[in-house]
Amino acid sequence: MDTSNGITPSSLAPDTAPGAGKGPIETDAVIVGAGPVGLFQVFELGLLEIKAHVIDSLSNVGGQCVELYPDKPIYDIPAVPICTGQELTDNLLKQIEPFEPTFHLGQEVTVVERREDGRFNVETSAGTRFITKTIFIAAGVGSFQPRTIKVDGIEKFENSQLFYRVKDPSQFHGKNLVICGGGDSALDWALNLVGKAESVVLLHRRDGFRAAPASVAKMKELCDNYEMQFLVGQVTGFEEADNKLSEVKVTGADGVTRRLPLDHLLVFFGLSPKLGPIAEWGLDIERKQLKVDTEKFETNVP
């Protein structure tokens, strides 16, 4: 995985575990979560000469910062007046590079069991197994899952014509796009793809937006110049031809349903945190959060 500052750690790739599918990996520390807190934990452990294995459900490091606002400025990092989510992640990767962590991406921790010798058995959804002395949970509010569009049957087009994130913008060049959402991601990608796509229609359930005011103003200017369209409404159905998504049915605020031809449907309804398997590890949970002793930040399981 190439990061913007040229750092390409050899261990930064999905399923890089040397023991994946074989015997368990024995280690001193497993970190659950590869967001900023998990990455900095690698540094703190490294200072103590403890090598860490890092597990994350996402296919890339950076957690919420990279998923939600990779290009947006962040102002609340100590001693860093301004940086983007991606820059913060890149700098953390550079900082921990000397400690050579191993990343296990695109997999969730599904099993945590205390062993008789005091260590823990850990297993992931990809079958990677560990025996570890310590577990550091840096999972925030849990793993992030995209909020999906609620239209029966449309999920069969996922990753072919229906997308919840953009990995390769060039695949949308020259295409007819419908982009759903009213937040920064929806507006940013609509603005980014105007002039590159054949057509761009932004669809939101109301006329108000949660995006940066400058982005909203730019979008409205492009609509006034007939370079893109904005419609108030929701996708309520679809049509297909030759097993491909050919058009979506959009029900407007006036209750009228219209047909909208398209090549690709991009949906940006945000990400929903999900505590996931952590809830089944036998740890005390209070209000969907792990309960800890704030002196040591240790759970009820030592």
Image (cartoon, helix red, strand yellow):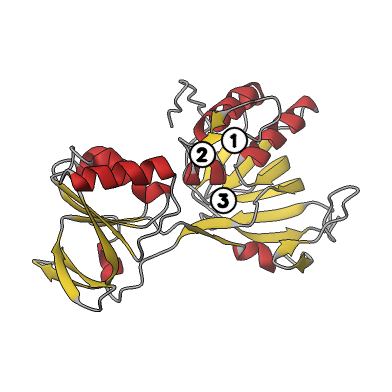
Label 1 vs label 3: CA separation? Answer: 12 Å
What residue is shown with label 1? 102
Residue 15 visible in the snapshot:
no
Say which quarter of the image contains residue 113. Answer: bottom right
Give the position of the C terminus as an image quadrant: bottom right
Residue ID at (27%, 67%) = 156
Residue 234 visible in the snapshot:
yes
Residue ID at (13%, 67%) = 243
Q: Is residue 257 left or right of residue 242?
A: right
Mark 3 surroundings within 10 Å by alpha-carbon count, few (fewer than 14), some (14 through 19), many (20 or more) = many
Are the residues at dot 1 and dot 3 in contact (C-beta closer than 8 Å)?
A: no
Helix, strand, or loop for circle 3? loop
Are the residues at dot 2 and dot 1 in contact (C-beta closer than 8 Å)?
A: yes
Task: Name the residue nearer the viewer: 77 or 301.
Answer: 77
Q: Position of residue 266 (x, y in %)?
A: 29, 55
Residue ID at (68%, 36%) = 52
What residue is shown with label 3? 128
Between circles 1 and 3, the one closer to the viewer is 1
Which amino acid is tagged 2?
A: Thr
Q: Is residue 163 left or right of residue 124?
A: left
Which amino acid is tagged 1?
A: Thr
Which amino acid is tagged 3?
A: Thr
Residue ID at (25%, 72%) = 252
The mark found on residue 16 in the picture is 2
Label 3 vs label 2: CA separation? Answer: 10 Å
Most extreme residue toward the right is: 295
Q: Mark 2 vs mark 1: which is more N-terminal?
A: 2
The mark found on residue 244 in the picture is none
Give the position of the N terminus as an image quadrant: top left
